[in-house]
Image (spheres, rainbow, N blue to C red):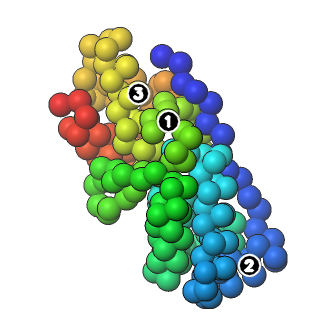
Amino acid sequence: MELAPFTPYLSNPTADSRRDIARQLIDESDASTNALRDGLLQILAMEGPTLSTRLFSLYGKKGGLERLTPRAKKRFSVALKKARGEGLVAMEQDPSVADVIALCWLPSMQRVAAREYGNRGFDHIPASELAEVMFELAAQSNASGAQLFQSMALLYGLKQLPKKAQPRLELVYREYLA
C-alpha cells in the first residue's frame, strides 16, 4: 500500500502572531471570530482532513500557546462552527476514546485520505484514515488485531507502536472493521 504525502502545517510564533491571537481570543467581535476562522481554514487547507483537536492545537501554537485553555477552545469552536455554517468546512464526529472530536475538511477535499504518518501522533490521525489503512493492510495480508497494528507501524515507518496508540487503534478496529 502506498500512502499519500502528509504536508504538515508549520509555524513559528512571533511577537505579532502572539499578540494577534491573544486579541482574537479575548475579543468576541465578528472581526476577531472571522480572523480565527480564516486561520483555521488556512491550516485545514494544508493538513485537511484533520481532527478539531489538532486544528486547534496548531493554531494555538502559532500564537505561542503551549496548552489550550477552555476559553481558547471555546473561541476556536465558535470560529469553526461559523465556518461550517458558511459552508466553508464540512464536519462529522470522529470516534474517540475520551472526548467528542470533530473530523474537519474543506468541501473541495475528499473526506478520507490515507497519508503518511508525518509529525502526527495516532491520536491526531482521523479514525476514518486509520480505518482505510487498516482495511487495505488487512485485505493484503489477512492480518488482524496486534499483527495488523504492527503492520501499520511498519507502513508508517515506525519501529513499534507508541504505547498510547493501542486504545485508539482498537477503537478504530471495532468501529470500522469488526
Tell me the number on the disc at residue 20: 2
Q: Amino acid at mark 1?
A: Gln
Image position of 57 with respect to 131: above or below: below
> How much space separates mark 2 and mark 3, taking CA atoms?
39 Å
| Image coords of residue 173 (percent x, y) | 26, 35
Instruction: Please report the residue visible at 47 percent of the width from the left and 25 percent of the height from the top.
Output: 154
Cα gap from disc 1 to disc 2, whole angstroms = 32 Å
Q: Tell me which residue sits at (66%, 79%) in the image.
A: 31
- Answer whether labels 3 and 1 touch (C-beta < 8 Å): no
The secondary structure type at the circle numbered 2 is helix
Nearest to viewer (mark 3 / mark 1): 1
Q: Looking at the image, is mark 2 or mark 3 nearer the viewer?
A: 2
Nearer to us: label 1 or label 2: 1
Could you tell me if residue 11 is visible in this image?
A: yes
Identify which amino acid the numbered label 3 is placed on.
Val
Label 3, secondary structure: give it: helix
Q: Quadrant of residue 133?
A: top left
Judging from the image, what secondary structure is the residue with disc 1 in?
Answer: loop
Marking on residue 110: 1
Q: Identity of the amino acid at label 2?
A: Asp
Q: Answer with left or right where residue 50 lies relative to residue 148.
A: right
